[in-house]
Image: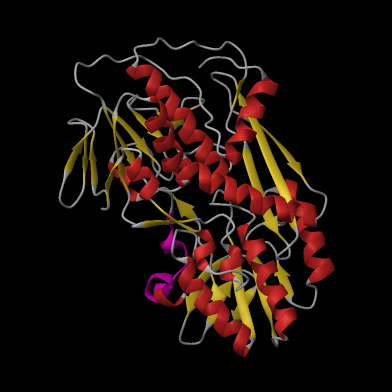
Amino acid sequence: MHPIAQPRRRQLLQAAALGVAVLSTGCASVSTAARPRVVVVGGGWGGLGAVRGLLATAAADVTLVEPNEAFMSCPLSAHFIAGHQPATDFQRSYSRVDQLGARRVRERVLEIDRTSKMVVTATQRLPYDFLVLSPGVDYMEDGIQGYAEARAQLPVGFRAFEQMAVRQQVDEFLAKGGDFVISAPKPPYRCPPAPYERAFLIAEQMKQRGTKGKIILIDANPNPMPPAIAQPILKGMKGLYANQIEYLTDTSISAVDMGKRQLVTSSGDVPFAHANLILPMRAPALIRQAGLGERWANIRLPSFQSQVDDRIYVIGDSQGTPLPKSGHVAFGSGQRVAEAITERIAGKSPVVSTGAVDLPLGICWANVTHKEAININVSGTVVAGEPPKLKFTVDAEANARSGAAAVSWGNGMWKAMLG
């Protein structure tokens, strides 16, 4: 990877939020007579970052495999879940990707045949020269006894379009009241601030509508995660929602009984009227089927290449590094991988840095009210052979400036992906 000065790299990464491509370099070159084929699995933040970068720079045939017909953002969608905004505010069409020349396959990937370099769906075998995997997350349902049988009644809502089912539960709770349980698992999981943000925005609606009851926030951790956000999150919880949120820390959930509407926890049984159990997470089964890792894909930083196959890149929330599992990191990783593949196709030799290399910047927001948010920035560097180093910069408390910035950030990112 080309070494790039720290200020310049930061400027480029921050510009990505306004729709500017963030690109870096790749690894060993490849030369083929035919036009190279790049398959991207997953049409979320990471996959779209890769697709847009590839369509802009690579002399390649690009195929996007995504089962959903449209895009729905998980970042910022807590505003929909809590009833503050309509779902359409967070949805976009894939038409721009089609117009730019990507082939879009609306199917689920069943298998990756690494020997034949094929992505297998129910009806097709898609050959690839390079493969970018951004399949998101799966839920570890077996961690809570009885959850699998209650799945339809306890939607998690951490994957695109699942927010609809959670919204239905929230609407019923706000209308009828009672005890609404939200849980936060131990990391790593997608968007660590999200359980607290959901609790805040639902509690805000409780106050506005006069809902009788409370939110029971069951946290498997001793404090809100990651640790850098604990103080502003606790400040918002105690300052605004002391009467709406009961916060249980260091509490794990072992079983759910939907007949009794009761959770078995390490702090005792907890009855509930409604529940949004946010389960521990892992990479989808596709990663294990392809031999790319167990809970998460094993990759090399800063290239995001698989440790076992240098023609496969894994980005987004499936990759197993300390980088935050957030939309902004996924998008930046996709853009980096697009540049790497572009340079390999062009036959360029990689430039190996001997010092620290900047990693994709993480920009994230945790709303405490519909209009006020906590800004969370995560920067990172990595030296070859060493673990990455991360630095958090977090607002001391929620504020309207960050609330407005979160909206602008979202609109800028969605435009960069699908505008």
Instruction: Give above or below for 298 relative to 43.
Output: above
Q: Quadrant of residue 217?
A: bottom right
Residue 255: x and y in percent read 49, 72
* Percent of width and height locating residue 204: 72, 73
Total residue callouts: 0
- Is residue 401 shown above or below 248? above
Q: Quadrant of residue 245?
A: bottom right
The reply to whether residue 287 is visible in this rendering is no
Q: How is the image coloured?
A: secondary structure
Coordinates of residue 226 in the picture (x, y in percent): 67, 48
In this rendering, does residue 268 appear at all? yes
Q: Residue furthest front?
A: 99
Q: Is residue 32 above or below residue 292?
A: above
Residue in the image at 63% along x and 76% along y: 268
**Is 311 within the magenta?**
no
- Residue 76 lies left or right of residue 256; in this view the side is right
Magenta stretch: residue 147 in it?
Answer: yes
Residue 20: percent from left, percent from top: 55, 34
User: Which residue shows up at 31% across the image and 39% down it?
Assistant: 102
Region in magenta = 138-151
Front-most of residues 343 and 262 = 343
- 233, above or below 338, in the image: below
Side (left or right) of 30 relative to 411: left
Residue 258 falls left or right of residue 133: right
What residue lies at 47% left-to-right and 42% top-to-bottom?
316
